[in-house]
Structures are given as structure tokens and as C-alpha cells.
Image (cartoon, rainbow, N blue to C red):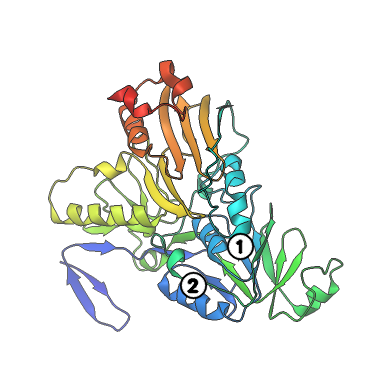
Amino acid sequence: LQCIGLRSGRTIEYDKLCIATGGRPKSRWHHPLVISIRDTETVDRLRDKMKHAKRIVVVGNGGIATEVVYELKNIEIFWAIRHSSISATFFDEGAADFFKPMLMDGHKPDTSSEHPAVSTRIRVTVENESHSSSAEMIGCALGPHWASHSDITGNLKKRSVHVIYNVEMEAIASEEEANAVEERTWCEGDWPLFVRLSNGQIIGTDLLINATGVEPNSQMWKEQCDELILAADQGILVDHHMMSSVPNVYACGDVCTAGWKWAKHWMQMRLWTQARQMGAYCGRAMALPEVSLDFCFELFTHVTTFFGFKVIFLGRFNGEGVEKPWHALLRITKDREYIKLIVHDGRIQGAVLVGETELEDVAENLILNQIDVTDIEDGLLDPDIDIGDYFD
């Protein structure tokens, strides 16, 4: 038997151990008015502090930041992002433009008009990318639809949103620093907190929401066990049975890094849905002597809600890891849907489906079966054609 020691001094013997300590927010700033959204407890804390707030700064550009900004009501919002478009962890600039009206209004547009929707179809070819970083592909493992069930309402009569692009947060500034800057537009007044951005701008605010993602909560284990191997991203390295470098010690969810050879259309992102899948598979791997790698690791899938729209990501949805040149097929219907298919060598490699597209089953089958769509590509996203008919 192996054993684990608790802080109380108690020792527990075990046959097998599963480490599922999740991730911790990436945050360098510790202040009572800085909140890192990571679980229901911090959402409750945000709700309490929002009641008297008039202005809030949100730092981060992933799923949590996007949901927070959309759900905030009756408050002035400053959204500081280090990219040139919103929600860049998941979406390209085209999708970001699709969502902008919802960002400003804070609600999904009314599509009950009798006027027929007009769809635009586009083809974009990618020969080379100026930059690509897997380190940016980090989400947060809070459960689905959490924001829609949380009343995060401020103290104003309406909301307003200011997006500040291509910046990062540098520090929490003092009141003296705020008074010394030349451009005092956003720090004028009596604010309990001042935030300095990388462009030199200082913003006065009632609250700061840190939503810059999570990092594996693995150091507590590594410090006590040198045999435990961590990956470059500090996740506990696990094999295809979710076992770590220490015999009979497993890890799953945000705390681990998948160390096996990934399937062509799967990638690890630290998301709630993926953590749940890993946990279920890890339990089977611990209980059974031989278990095959779960089918969920064949195809990346993530279903969520952004800006009031159902959103589905499939396979290599952002083109990362797809051999170049590849091209994207787009269908955009204003205020209704945004569809993007990643195509290489006549075969679909990934998809982004926003809205009630009813294409998820077809897209999933096209990716998994790698059916050649070269001959039907022009009509693949034609709204007047049911593409399911092609494959019946």
C-alpha cells in the first residue's frame, strides 16, 4: 500500500489515488476588490460586491470573461484584452464582429421579424499564420451556463461597454499615480481601486474581475514528491490511462496534461466539459485492468453559450494544428448564425457553429469519417440546401 499525508498529521493508505485538484486562476494581484472567477463561491462574492458598483474592469479574453461581460447589467464595463478582437480564445475576428451588437446591448437580438434573413457565404484561405501559440488556448473549468443563473447587476440604470484592445494589465495603481497621469479621463473621481494598463492608461473602478485563465494546481503535489513529472505547462503528465509517473497515482481535469499521442481532431483545453470527460474515463481506468482510450478523445467537442447563442466547437475549430494550406468556409446570417468549417484537402477538420444551425451531427460525421467534400463544397453551406441529404 502507498500512503498520503494530510496537513493534520493523519496518514491515509491507498491502493490507487486520483489527483483532481483542478486549476487555480492566473493572478498576480491580491486585493479585496480583485475577484478571480473560478467557482460558485467567487460568483457569489461577485454578486454581493456588484450591488453597489458603478464601474467594473474585466481583464481576460476567454470564455469566462466573455460570459461576465455579456451578463453584467446596469454598470459601466471596461474590458481590457490583449488581442485585436474579443473572445479570441475561441473566435476569429469575423465571429467577433458577429457578436459585437450583442456585446454592446447586453442581450440577444430579436429575430422574430417577418423579414427573411440574408446569409453571406465566404471562403478564406490560410497559407501561413503570423503567429500561433498553444499557450493561449486555455479556458476555465467553471460549469456551463453559470453566468445566466447569476444576477450580477450593478448600481446604474443601464450598462455601457468600453473594449480596450491590445493591452494587458500591468499593476494596481495608487491614487497618487492616477492623479499624476496626463490622460485622466477614466480615473477622474473618487474610486476605491485604480488599474494601470500596458498602454499607460489608468482606470478608476469599483471592482476588477481577473479572468485570464487558469493554471494547473499541481505544485502542492510536486513539492512533496519529486517522482511526479510535470509537463511544460505545469500540468501533471499522464499517459493514455490517466496515470502519472508515480505508480497507482492518476490525475484528471485541469490539473493534468494529456501526455499520449493525441488523435488528429482532438486537443486539450482546460474546459469544464473536458474535465468531466477526463474524470469519468479516469474512474474507469482505475477500476478496470485494461480499458481502451475513451471515444471522447477522438474528437474535440465543446458546447456552451456565448452572448445568448448556442455555440458548438468541433475538432480543430480554430485551424491550429491543421496542415497548411487550409481554407475556411463561412456562412454568416446577421443576428442569427455564424458557421465556420475548416477544410484541408477536401475534408472537414473542424467547425464553429453559432446559433440554431442544426449542422452539428453532419459536421461531426464529416470530421470523424473524413469524407471528401470537394465536389459539393460550393453548396455545402447553401442555406437552401439540406446538406444532410448529401450523406443519407
Q: Residue at x 29, y 47 (%)?
A: 239
Quadrant of the image occupied by residue 105: bottom right
Mark 2 or 1: in front is 2
For the residues marked 2 and 1, what is the alpha-carbon distance in whole angstroms? 20 Å
Type of the residue with mark 1: Val
Element under disc 1 = strand
Query: Quick check: marks 2 and 1 in contact, CB under 8 Å?
Result: no
What residue would you read off at disc 1? 59
Relative to 325, 171 lies left or right = right
- Residue occupying the far top of the picture: 375
Quadrant of the image occupied by residue 80: bottom right
Residue 205 location (% of width, % of height):
68, 74
Residue 52 location (% of width, % of height):
61, 81
Q: Is residue 98 above or below residue 187?
A: above
* Mark closer to the chain start, 2 or 1: 1
**How many numbered discs?**
2
Q: Residue at x 58, y 59 (%)?
A: 60
Residue 67 location (% of width, % of height):
51, 60
Q: Which of the pair 271/53 is nearer the observer?
A: 53
Q: Is residue 211 visible?
A: no
The label shown at residue 151 is: 2
The label shown at residue 316 is: none
Type of the residue with mark 2: Asp
